[in-house]
């Protein structure tokens, strides 16, 4: 029986029950439920565990031996509730745990977890005689429950946020209608290489879980993996370059270049243009000079005119690559320690979906030093044309010469 069914039963019979019959009813329900029955009845009815336990003893001994049949406690009898004996208890409790006090530097629980034991300690300091069990019960009665953080705040939204989404979508559809490649790019979360715990579970012989390291510290000589992904928005295909140095714009464009040589050129033999959709930050951000300079070199070598459309700031979760490619990679290697670069590349390359996703992956051992920036003269030679609508987010880079490599 679930808690909702039990609660409905109790509400149906409660008006006609005396204090004694209520206790016996709760005890009989708990006994019928078996293991865990007392806790379930307590949650469903609000009748305390000691009261239910007392009812169970009466049922076992026979109710007539513990209390005369004609005797019933009058309304309001019995031990007074703590909140009734201590008029300020509930007020002080809610003042401690009220969410708005999180911004008050003088709140005693500002810098500690709001566990029921910590709350009980603070109530003791205020002169209340309470246990942590009573605190938990009072919180539930007041409508509180254990809550995890929830990602909902995206920060201030740009006034043209939705308009940029529409513009980006129109660009993708236009390229697809004209059979020109359109891709989504981004860097996946960096991964430590080694026998570390990887979130998730996988089937193993019972009692033979794979042991991993307790602490996640970088292992000298193994380093970290930096996966940079390219997702083909039309063909449901992905490419991931696994770097070992730094996530720079040079690394990002090299990953796009590798995708083009290994997959894109064969899929789009008549392509003259390429659309790239990217986040507004990281190695492929619109303010990164090296990103634009490297794209110019890519355009020069391939003869492609490259259009870039960036997502508005703070909206990276809408990037298609996140849930069309990266999420499936994470599901494919869940529960598997990423013990080597070869394992990482293999797990990425083995990622598939029932919808037909195919992924290729290669290791990129090249070095990409930080702090590289094009000169003013190099930037002046860019064949970059900003679009009329938010040219800082949308622009096209044309090649200097039509020479394909």
Image (cartoon, rainbow, N blue to C red):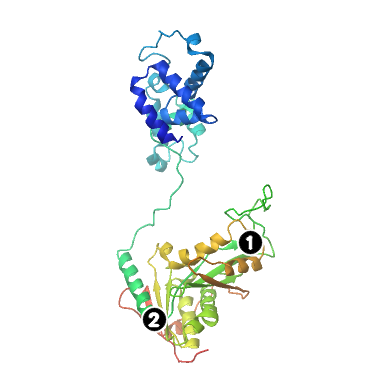
> Mark 2 against mark 1, which lies toward the viewer?
1
Could you say where residue 342 lies in the image, as x and y percent from the top left?
65, 68
> Is residue 121 at all visible to an observer of this figure?
no
Question: Camera-side residue: 37 or 254?
Answer: 37
At 51% from the left and 84% from the top, the residue drawn is 266
> Is residue 63 at all visible to an observer of this figure?
yes
The answer to which of marks 2 and 1 sits earlier in the sequence is: 1
Helix, strand or loop for disc 2: strand
Could you say where residue 53 lies in the image, as x and y percent from the top left?
51, 21
Question: Camera-side residue: 238 or 3?
Answer: 3
Numbered label tally: 2
Quarter where residue 394 is shown: bottom left
Above or below for 182 versus 193: below
Above or below for 223 versus 391: above
Q: Residues within 10 Å of mark 2 (few under 14, many from 20)?
A: many
Above or below for 298 versus 116: below
Q: Which residue is mark 2?
A: 396
Question: Camera-side residue: 357 or 245?
Answer: 357
Q: Which mark is residue 338?
A: 1
Using residue 249 as the reference point, say whether residue 213 is left or right of it: right
At 52% from the left and 63% from the top, the residue drawn is 328
Q: Which mark is residue 94?
A: none
Question: Camera-side residue: 320 or 82?
Answer: 320
Could you say where residue 360 lies in the image, as x and y percent from the top left?
56, 73
Above or below for 98 versus 178: above
Helix, strand or loop for disc 1: loop
CA–CA distance between discs 2 and 1? 39 Å
In the rendered structure, are the residues bearing label 2 and label 1 in contact, judged by CB atoms less than 8 Å apart?
no
Quarter where residue 304 is shown: bottom left
Q: Residues within 10 Å of mark 1 (few under 14, many from 20)?
A: many
């Amino acid at each position: 029986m679930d808690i909702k069914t039990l609660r409905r039963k109790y509400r149906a019979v409660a008006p006609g029950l005396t204090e004694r019959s209520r206790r016996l009813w709760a005890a009989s329900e708990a006994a019928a439920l078996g293991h865990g029955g007392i806790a379930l009845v307590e949650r469903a009815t609000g009748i305390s565990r000691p009261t239910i336990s007392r009812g169970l003893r009466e049922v076992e001994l026979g109710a007539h031996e513990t209390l005369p049949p004609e005797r019933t406690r009058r309304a309001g009898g019995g031990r007074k509730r703590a909140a009734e004996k201590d008029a300020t208890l509930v007020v002080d409790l809610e003042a401690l745990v009220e969410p708005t006090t999180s911004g008050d530097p003088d709140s005693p629980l500002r810098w500690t977890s709001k566990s029921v034991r910590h709350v009980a300690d603070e109530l003791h300091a205020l002169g209340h005689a309470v246990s942590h069990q009573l605190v938990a019960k009072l919180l539930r009665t007041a409508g509180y429950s254990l809550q995890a953080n929830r990602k909902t705040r995206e920060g201030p939204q740009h006034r043209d946020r939705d308009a940029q989404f529409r513009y980006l979508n129109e660009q993708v559809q236009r390229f697809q209608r004209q059979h020109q490649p359109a891709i989504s790019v981004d860097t996946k979360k960096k991964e430590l290489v080694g026998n570390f715990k990887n979130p998730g579970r996988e089937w193993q012989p019972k009692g033979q879980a794979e042991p991993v390291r307790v602490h996640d510290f970088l292992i000298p000589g193994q380093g970290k993996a930096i996966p940079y992904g390219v997702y083909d928005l039309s063909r449901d295909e992905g490419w991931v370059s696994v770097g070992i140095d730094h996530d720079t714009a040079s690394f990002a464009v090299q990953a796009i270049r590798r995708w083009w040589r290994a997959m894109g050129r064969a899929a789009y033999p008549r392509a003259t243009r390429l659309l790239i959709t990217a986040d507004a930050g990281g190695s492929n951000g619109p303010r990164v000079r090296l990103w634009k300079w490297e794209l110019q070199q890519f355009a020069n070598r391939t003869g492609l005119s490259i259009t870039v459309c960036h997502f508005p700031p703070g909206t990276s979760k809408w990037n298609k690559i996140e849930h069309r490619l990266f999420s499936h990679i994470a599901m494919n290697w869940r529960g598997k320690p990423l013990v080597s670069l070869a394992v990482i590349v293999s797990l990425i390359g083995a990622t598939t979906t029932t919808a037909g996703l195919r992924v290729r992956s290669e290791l990129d051992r090249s070095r990409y030093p930080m702090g590289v920036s094009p000169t003013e003269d190099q930037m002046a030679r860019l064949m970059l044309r900003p679009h009329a609508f938010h040219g800082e987010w949308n622009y096209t880079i044309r090649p200097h010469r039509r020479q394909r490599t």
